[in-house]
Image (spheres, rainbow, N blue to C red):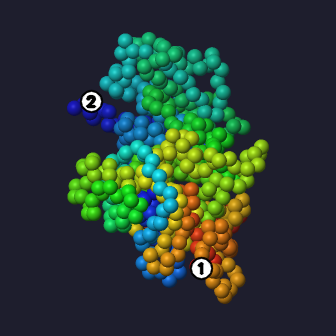
Amino acid sequence: MAAFGGRSCLKYLLHLAHDNLDFRLAEIKALLALRAKPFQPCECFKEKSPFLCLDGLCEEDVRRVMARSVCAKSAFELWGQGQTHNELKTSLLNYSSENMSPYMHKDSTYRISVYTFNKTLQFADRIKKINALEYLPFEGTVSLKNPQHIFCLLEDYGTDPNSIPEHPNYIYFGRWIADGQRELIRSHSVKDRHFIGNTSMDAGLSFIMANHAKVKENDLVFDPFVGTGSLLVACSHFGAYVCGTDIDYNTIHGKGRSSRKNQKWRGPDENIRANLRQYGTEKMYVDVMVSDASKPVWREAALFDAIITDPPYGIRESTRRTGSHKDITKPLDGMYVESHVPVSRAYHLSDIFTDLLNFSARHLVMGGRLVYWLPVYRPDHSEVDLLV
Amino acid sequence: MKLLTHNMLTSHVKGVIKGFPLIIKATEVKVNEVEFNPEFVSRMIPKLEWNALVQAAEELGQRQDLPGELVPDFEKNEEFLKKVHRVLLEVEVIEGCLKCPESGREFPICKGIPNMLLNEDEV
């Protein structure tokens, strides 16, 4: 009985990468929501800090979050914390030995790492800090290469690189549980992708968007401004089936001028389907179509589990819709030839977003998310403007 | 174009009231092997217009023994789900067109990609 009570009040520490600060917490919250768990940060919570301490979770929750997150570097089972090493020692000695003992066996192997945020520490100093933890009841043997259990001493030296304190502002000690998915940023880099465009979404941001949208296995995801399919690549990686539309015939068919510096024309294996094939998720490809997002072609039903998109802003890609400014007095001749390219006219930014919101209201399942980029003019922008 | 997509598409020609389902006129159809995922098929079935799916499969000569009515308790019926999986995700129209049932307007399909753009006089 006591053991059960003990393990359920465990705290977990997430070490977040110091990047995309505005999107980190939303990503963690979304991933917790996928587990139907609330976001419960501990008392000393600071939004800009790379250390996020969470309550109310179990180890499986943390592992599942780390299996998806590209904002979190690592996760630890928090054993102790404090503003000074003495406070840390007190905190650690207060940590239930019942919770410690499974990892302290004399037949087990372990290693302690030291991580310092915003400060570089010499090797000798790291060893000193590890040795200072000798009060912990480790009975196993140290193995640097392949330990069964990894522990980490994490020190926070603040967020100002120009004013690094002598002593850390805060210290944590915990048992390493899992690393995040930051490797995806490199493995799915747009630099190595078969098919790209001028505005293909960065890999890291694509995965963050897929997480924000709570994409899960067997979802059906749609991108109405799909371009070269970067967002679909990320969603398919998380197990969703994907489809998209774009008004640009060449991009959808993978034709025309290449976006790469040393290449003039796109090759035969350059299209959205090939991108999914490159990462082994071709089976998640449903369809892409040439279509005008302002004139949706879907029947009235809640079809999509998530809509994730990066609409054109009119700066690096043109914003257009089918239609002409001239009066059409005479309709075109009977046969609609495949080669006829419809005349387009301006698609004003505010209309793009109004249409997108209306489209989502009609075609998203209840509880489904719409995730999109909204360009703002910073001098004029305030949060109030976002309320439609 | 897969039949899953076709089941969700409708004609949006100006003035058309009943643009669903689009009639498929295919000149080239391919059947690929796609990994069977019973959970995904089960999730999609409630979103489908079943009659339109059967009709489309029929139009392509790919219906095989797909039943005309939804089978009750389909989530556990793996045999049924496999048939639906084949029709939804494995059959693909590579060349052809989609024809609006009311106006007759044809949307071409080229290299498996439908072109749903309307001309400037139709919007």
The residue nearer to you, when weighing B96 against A328, is: B96
Instruction: Classify mark 2: residues with Cα within 10 Å, few (<14), some (14-19) or many (20+).
Output: few
- Relative to A39, A249 lies left or right: right
Count every numbered label the image shows and give the total. 2
Mark 1 sits on what residue? Answer: A334
Q: Position of residue A237 (x, y in %)?
A: 49, 44
Q: Chain of mark 2?
A: A
One can see residue A362 in this view: no
Q: For the residue labelled by badge 1, is the local secondary structure a helix, a strand or a loop?
A: loop
Above or below, comparing residue B101 to residue A145 in the picture:
below
One can see residue A142 in this view: yes
Q: Do the residues under discs 1 and 2 have CB atoms within 8 angstroms?
A: no
- Relative to A272, A3 lies left or right: left
- Mark 1–mark 2 Cα distance, whole angstroms, equals 78 Å
Above or below, comparing residue A110 to residue A79 in the picture:
above
Q: Position of residue A42 (x, y in %)?
A: 44, 43
Which residue is found at the position 70% from the left and 65% from the top?
A318
Q: For the residue labelled by badge 2, is the local secondary structure a helix, a strand or a loop?
A: helix
Which residue is found at the position 67% from the left and 52% from the top?
A197
Q: Position of residue B31 (x, y in %)?
A: 44, 50
Residue type (three-letter) at the residue carrying disc 2: Ala
Q: In the image, which disc is placed on residue A3?
A: 2
Q: Chain of mark 1?
A: A
Q: In the image, which disc is placed on residue A111?
A: none
Above or below, comparing residue A128 to residue A336 in the picture:
above
Image quarter (top left, top right, bottom left or bottom right) of the C terminus of chain B: bottom right
